[in-house]
Amino acid sequence: MDYFQKFKGRFMGVMQWDDCHNLLQVLHDNPKNWYVYDTLEMMPNSVMNADKFTDEITKIKTLIDDKHEEKYCGIVYTDDLKNPTFVKIFHPKNLGKSCGSSENPPMPQWLISKEKPMDVVAEFGPKEVSEGFISKYLKL
């Protein structure tokens, strides 16, 4: 299965805060051989070194705790809570339309995986919308 298939595959939503913190702790405690792809930055070509990885997980956890004001988590998804190999984390202030039911759901900000990333932003990100002649000038 390639990276795109895994990205579009089945993930468990992490709803409880305890589960979210436990998952982030599992990542923190096992810092070797992870790719961290911040989809707002350049795609990584190599795994992140262990010290930088633990710093990044701490930074993400702090941001989630500070910015996500819900009683439930709901912005972290993983292929396995206890032995993750792929984790998607959405930025709490960039969730787009609720429930992810839109034609172009928001892109996760962080993709943490054991497999080398492929450019999911180009492949699955929002597509350019061409404007029609009238709406281009009238902004309909």
Image: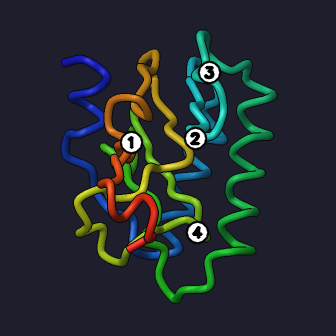
Tell me the CA gap for discs 4 and 3.
Answer: 26 Å
| Residue that mark 4 sits on | 92
Is the C-beta separation of discs 2 and 4 under 8 Å?
Answer: no
Using a 10 Å C-alpha cutoff, classify the residue at mark 2 as few (fewer than 14 neighbours), some (14 to 19) or many (20 or more). Answer: many
Seen at 47% across and 82% down, the residue is: 72
Tell me the CA gap for discs 1 and 2.
Answer: 26 Å
Quadrant placement of the N terminus: top left
Quadrant placement of the C terminus: bottom left
- Three-letter amino acid code of the residue under disc 4: Pro
Is the C-beta separation of discs 1 and 3 under 8 Å?
Answer: no
| Residue that mark 3 sits on | 32
Q: Earlier in the sequence, mark 1 or mark 4?
A: 4
Tell me residue 8's x, y (percent): 23, 39
Tell me the CA gap for discs 1 and 4.
Answer: 18 Å
Which of the 4 image quadrants contains residue 68?
bottom right
| Placement of 118 over or under 6, stated as above or below | above
Q: Earlier in the sequence, mark 3 or mark 2?
A: 2
Tell me the CA gap for discs 1 and 3.
Answer: 29 Å
Tell me residue 48's x, y (percent): 68, 20
Q: Earlier in the sequence, mark 1 or mark 3?
A: 3
Q: Nearer the viewer, mark 2 or mark 4?
A: 4
Using a 10 Å C-alpha cutoff, classify the residue at mark 3 as few (fewer than 14 neighbours), some (14 to 19) or many (20 or more). Answer: some
Instruction: Give residue 125's mark.
Output: 1
Q: Earlier in the sequence, mark 4 or mark 3?
A: 3
